[in-house]
Image (cartoon, helix red, strand yellow):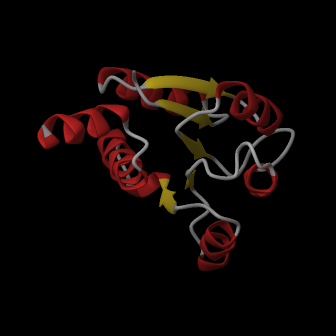
Amino acid sequence: MAAKILIIEDDQLLRKIISRKLKKEKYRAIEATDGEEGLRSAQLENPDLILLDLVLPQIDGFEVLARLKKNPNASEIPVIILSNLGDEEKVEAGLKLGAVDYLIKAQLNPGDIINKIKKVLNKKGRNPAFVKTLAGKQN
């Protein structure tokens, strides 16, 4: 079973590029275009990881992250912030709210994002393919 990644991003082009790359890597991509939709999708889909933009319509990414971390059903889902807001204050605020990492869009390509996702999922034991590989090695 493929890991589910929720992409909460209002930039359609970037969202589609990331989604295509995730699907190519055998992940299941779920897309949300604003904070409200992102929160609903997180609740309904129970993703293995969330990629979260900060500048969003409806509810901004900081508020989305705060609500996710207060929700017992979603608080353990790793969240990677993916934003162009790169000043130290924003990065610190995002990490303090519970994000596992903070990536600056302008400094990345889709491959970098995928590598970070793999690293976070493998660390959390939430990557089904990785866990299956480990189980196979123990036999």
User: Could you say which quadrant of the image residue 63 lies in?
Assistant: bottom right
Farthest right residue in view: 58
The reply, left or right, for residue 85 in relation to residue 35 is left
The reply, left or right, for residue 1 in relation to residue 5 is left
Where residue 112 appears, x then y in whole percent? 32, 48
The answer to which of 131 and 116 lies nearer the viewer is: 131
The answer to which of 67 and 72 lies nearer the viewer is: 72
- Above-or-below relation of 28 to 103: above
Residue at 33% across, 23% down: 26
Where residue 135 appears, x then y in whole percent? 23, 38
User: Could you say which quadrant of the image residue 59 lies in?
Assistant: top right
Question: Which quarter shows the N terminus?
Answer: top left
Farthest front residue in view: 139
Where residue 118 appears, x then y in whole percent? 34, 45
- Above-or-below relation of 131 to 106: above
- Above-or-below relation of 98 to 42: below
Residue at 30% across, 41% down: 111
Where residue 52 appears, x then y in whole percent? 62, 46
The reply, left or right, for residue 46 in relation to residue 44 is left
User: Could you say which quadrant of the image residue 69 lies in?
Assistant: bottom right
Residue at 49% across, 58% down: 104
Residue at 64% across, 32% down: 46
Question: Which quarter shows the C terminus?
Answer: top left
Count of marks placed on residues: 0
- Above-or-below relation of 81 to 137: below
